Amino acid sequence: MRHAHPVETVRAAEAALMARLPEGTLMQRAAAGLAATCARLLTRRRGRVYGSRVTVLAGSGDNGGDALYAGARLARRGARVTAVLLAPEKAHPGGLAALRAAGGRATADQEVGLADFSCADLVLDGIVGIGGRGGLRPEAVPYARAGRRGTVVAVDLPSGVDADSGEVPGEALRADVTVCFGTYKPGLLIDPGAEYAGAVQLVDIGLAPPEPEVTALQHADVAGLLPLPGAESDKYRRGVVGVAAGSARYPGAALLAVAGALRGGAGAVRYVGTAAEEVVRRFPETLVTEGGPAGAGRVQAWVVGPGGGEGARQALTEALASDVPVLVDADGLTELGRLGPAALAGRTAPTLLTPHTGEAARLLAGADGTPPPAADDLAAARLATARRLAAGYRATVLLKGSTTVVADPGGAVRVNPTGTPWLATAGSGDVLAGLAGSLLAAGLTPLDAASAAAYLHGLAGREAAGDPGAPVTALAVAEALPTVWRAVRQP
């Protein structure tokens, strides 16, 4: 599991560690790890470090110091290192002295700096550290816009990205690799910041921060969550998931939600809705019940809303009146936005909401009666949006998008590291809803069900698209789920 901590927590952990170490030890640890990564990248690119052209973009403060000390280490290995000082009067004195002593040179001339940046084999972005706010300063903007041929390595965080949220309020420098120190920062795991970070590598400098604020699951974590039937299991003990989906206009949504549910770990799927005939024809193992959720018989969880059309309000009301977990998606979310958080106020069982940003906007408007915020604004602040929804509705929220964020009302947040842009296709969300609902019925908590479902769904999208990738259908994603389930479960 990847653990991410906000800046305030990182600073406190650094201060506690520095109080026990000789002065400068922490910076030297960071510089050593950074230089080692850069040396590997240069060797991969050119076959050696010696003779490589390296440009260090050094801002003020410790971030610039880390970059300068790493540049000194590369210079001692024969690299031709130039430090571009964006704030010459505030450049880290020890790092600058070390660079010059190792044979590197420094310049404050922007024209020279841009030329070196453009032709370098490797660039170290040490402009702004994790304490930076508000995007790049004017003197750094030309580097974000300039063309370059070399590999850009961000020092702890790409300059211009907010460390705590992943928001990019202005221009930012796009990295190929980010070397972060001690712990991941939330902004490295959440778009749009994650997109600027490239491949993220963690360097252990001895920090011992407390419980993380944001986590990202990995294969072993998901494997531990997936339900595994025992010798005495039967379909009812494994759980029954109810699916209320589909309409005359959107019958395919029912098929896709059921397809995801059948592959999600529950022992049986019970369908209610207008597409019963089509569902049974395609999936004869499905249990079909006439009417709505209220008369469907016993289930361990409900999935309500995919393609629900005009019947979504009634299905939502009946499902929320039950005493089992309810996942609300698509048209169910539209109806919930009209009803507002009061619709969930009397529930004793948990609720899982699975909006995209457009649906999130309608939910937020329903929560406080204000006009819907712009979906693009919510996408640019994904972490804050998911937390706001979870708090407002007292429900677990799976906010779909380029980075899927799962937040629960207790404050836990997980971000999903899997997926592919090819998943942006009609019906993909219906499959995800069915999969997550099935995991709920199998006994997982909403946080775990949402996190595991997003992880598997992202892997299935990659599996269906193949390498280097091709268009996929939602049904192909559902059909890939058993393959990725087995891959995750393999030791």
Image (tube, grey):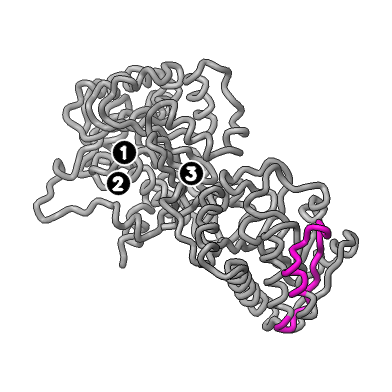
SS class, disc 3:
loop
User: Which of the two discs, 1 and 2, labels the residue nearer the N terminus?
Assistant: 2
The reply to whether the magenta stretch includes residue 242 is no
Which quadrant of the figure contains the C terminus?
bottom left
User: Dot 1: within a 10 Å radius of its alpha carbon, few (fewer than 14), some, or many (20 or more) residues?
Assistant: many
SS class, disc 1:
helix
Kind of residue at disc 2 = Gly
Q: Residue at x 77, y 61 (%)?
A: 91
Measured as percent of width and height from the top left, residue 270 is found at 23, 34
Which residue is denoted by mark 3 in the rendering? 404
Magenta residues, as a range?
76-99
- Along the horizontal axis of the image, is 78 left or right of 444? right
Asked whether 436 or 121 is in front, the reply is 121
Q: Residue at x 27, y 44 (%)?
A: 444
Residue 459 lies in quadrant: bottom left
Query: Looking at the picture, does residue 21 appear above or below residue 386?
Result: below
Query: Looking at the picture, does residue 457 appear above or below residue 331?
Result: below
Q: Nearer the viewer, mark 3 or mark 2?
A: 3
